[in-house]
Amino acid sequence: AACLARQLREAGTALGGYEVLEIGAGSGRLAAGLLSSLGPEAGPVRYRILERSADLKEAQRDCLAREAPGSLDLVEWIDEPPEDDWEGVLIANEVLDALAVERFRLEDGDIRQLCVGVGEDGFCWDSRQAPAELADAVAGLEAVLGDGYLQRLGRRGYQSEINPLLSPWLQAVTRSMRRGLALFVDYGYPRSEYYLPERRDGTLMCHYRHRAHEDVFFWPGLQDLTAWVDFTALAEAADACGLDVEGYCSQAMFLLGCGLEQVLAEEAAISDETAAERAAEARQLTLPGMMGKRFQVMGLGRGLDRPLSGFGLQDLRHRLDAPGR
């Protein structure tokens, strides 16, 4: 949170008085950490959390009251994206992976839509001819992947997912951001790596009580379903929404660009125990085998006229092969 706070402070300085909109704040720890790190002088004039779950709202409120009590009066919970114009920073940490996706299968040049059916043993995957909207969206992937790529994938059977509603969702959450920065942190790939032959079953995963697996029919209605993010699709959606791709890099390089080493040094000067805890967290967030490389960060801007430190050490926009980079 301390590293991300530095990026917020930098963007906030360029914007003047700024607000923060966090989408899906989870436990509330990130919000509490950001507000504590920023303090009253560099903090936002308002911190809005877009959250529809009453239980999560209560958990977030409790966390903020415990860890950032002095900033609690800045926090406002909303159920829908704001309609009033605002300037500031939008944060979406592990939000895109939870958006609903369409599953499809390629079979000998044919595009099939994967649906849930009922067989002798319960729920199962069924397929049908893809409706025109889905077929067009899948066929459009070849603009980046190259002509004939999907046909080659489908020769041995290939299934994956696509999010045709990403652009309208992004439009809904950024429409009222007159000037500002939208930061998206999630696990994913650029399109050229997302639809590789070895990923022939897609990236759909299930999560239940800290356990991850691939059987979507094991605990229907109880487990969370996620899919990795196609960051090229996010860049394309940004272009359609009038946003600029300000930067794209791994989470590890983003944190280092935001001064991770200096943050750890400052923590070490305060407390050995705190330093050890922060060092362990930093390893988890930056090591390639853990979250450092699998998690990516993309910054989308509107009306920004300065470079961002978080993307100063690594620029992977050339790997997106998408408009707006």
Image (tube, rainbow, N blue to C red):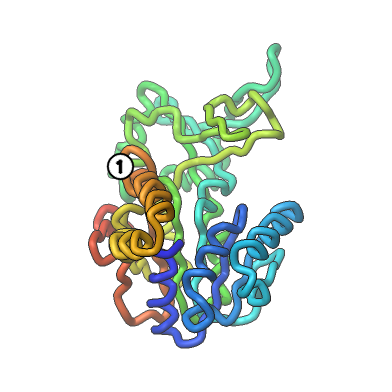
Task: Looking at this view, name the residue that lies furthest to the top.
Answer: 120
Q: Residue at x 35, y 24 (%)?
A: 155
Displayed quadrant of residue 218 = top right
Q: Residue at x 42, y 50 (%)?
A: 277
As helix, strand or loop, the secondary structure at mark 1 comes to loop
Q: Is residue 320 left or right of residue 41?
A: left
Q: Residue at x 38, y 28 (%)?
A: 154
**Residue linked to disc 1:** 288
Q: Is residue 96 left or right of residue 191?
A: right
Task: Looking at this view, name the residue that lies furthest to the right.
Answer: 54
Q: Residue at x 64, y 64 (%)?
A: 64
Mark 1: few/some/many CA within 10 Å (<14, 14-19, 20+): some
Q: Quadrant of the C terminus?
A: bottom left
Residue type at mark 1 is Pro
Q: Work out whether residue 217 or residue 163 is closer to the camera in this orientation and state it.
A: 217
Task: Looking at this view, name the residue that lies furthest to the bottom.
Answer: 16
Kindly tell me whether residue 295 is visible in this rendering. no
Residue 14 is situated, as x and y percent measured from the top left of the image, at 39, 84
Q: Work out whether residue 287 or residue 277 is closer to the camera in this orientation and state it.
A: 277
> Total marks drawn?
1
Residue 158 is situated, as x and y percent measured from the top left of the image, at 42, 28
Residue 319 is situated, as x and y percent measured from the top left of the image, at 26, 53
